[in-house]
Amino acid sequence: MQILDGQLASRQLKDTLKLQVAQLVIEGKKVPHLAAVLIGNNGASETYVNAKVKACSEIGFKSTLIRLEDTVSENKLLGIIEELNGDIEIDGILVQLPLPSHISDEKVINAIEPSKDVDGFHPVSIGRMVQGLPTFIPATPHGIMLLLQHYQIDTTGFHAVILGRSNIVGRPISILLSSNSNPGNCTVTVCHSKTRDLGNLCRQADMVIAALGRPEFVKADMIKEQAVVIDVGITRVPDATKKKGFALKGDVLFSEVSSKCSFITPVPGGVGPMTIAALLKNTFKACTDKN
Ligand code: GUN
């Protein structure tokens, strides 16, 4: 079994981006600038957004963090997005999800100018991805593809079983893995809460992508010997022995599954850092496509 080290792979991607930013500076060109909007005080969202902003500064990107109260009105938020859309200094816009329940995800995502949609959630970005056209690929699926690429895992002909059909992970990774590309060229099964005999489907998989947000749901008896296992889950589970009062748990029972598979991502340190690297790549593209 080999660990797919997302920390290591993302470090390499960030080092490359850092050199590319330095080259932009030498050429007197614009440096990428990400605007991140964080609403409310969700601990996990704060951690993710802070990590994104920190990664920007590590590689020489500019970033602006806009913090809003969770009582902010939908109209106010849409107005801020409109301003960011029109601001030529800003290359990429990210509104951290989930949003408070009085704000429509759909309206907010649709309001972001597609050329600044570094999360790749806008219908234009998704449509272009489905058609295999150049676009922004959502950061988590993009990060998974980059990790498979980094470890040169040839997925051609794989049966990939995806657990979860979210717009952020499950659905887009199903499109990417079924595309005529490598990584890609998989036969894909997307499982969800209504899937019958999920264990049986998983046992047929050459690769399982677990993205359901249910801690340690995937057990060893669901995994074929030598399968590739990608764990997207990262749930905070109360744990009094930890300083922060919680432990981070993936969707895969690592202690059982790791001895059975060929490759596996750890949690933390697997998909999470790759998501950030992918966001940075998207932001670099948003900047250089325009300037
Ligand atoms: N919430 C969970 N994942 C993501 C992501 O990739 N982007 C944004 N904006 N919010 C998220």
Image (cartoon, grey):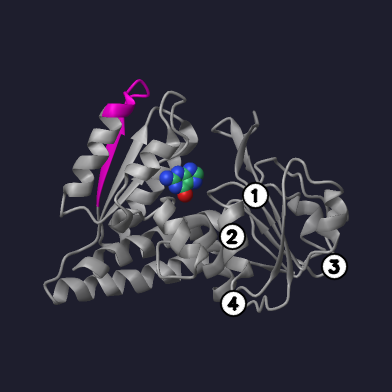
Q: Is mark 4 on a helix, strand or loop?
A: loop
Q: What residue type is labelled 2?
A: Ile
Q: Which amino acid does label 1 sit on?
A: Ala
Magenta part of the chain: 63-75
Cβ atoms at labels 2 and 4 below 8 Å apart: no
Could you say which disc has been placed on residue 211 in the image? 1
Cβ atoms at labels 1 and 2 below 8 Å apart: yes
Neighbour class for label 3 at 10 Å: few (<14), some, many (≥20)? some
Residue pointed to by mark 3:
225
Could you say which disc has been placed on residue 173 in the image? 2
Of the image marks 4 and 1, the number of the one nearer the N terminus: 4
Q: Where is residue 264 drawn, in percent x and y? A: 69, 63
Res 75 visible = yes
As for residue 61 lying within the magenta part, the answer is: no
Name the foreground residue: 166 vs 29: 166
Position of residue 181 in the picture relative to residue 70 (left or right): right
Q: Where is residue 258 drawn, in percent x and y? A: 76, 60
Position of residue 180 in the picture relative to residue 102 (left or right): right
Q: Where is residue 6 drawn, in percent x and y? A: 54, 63
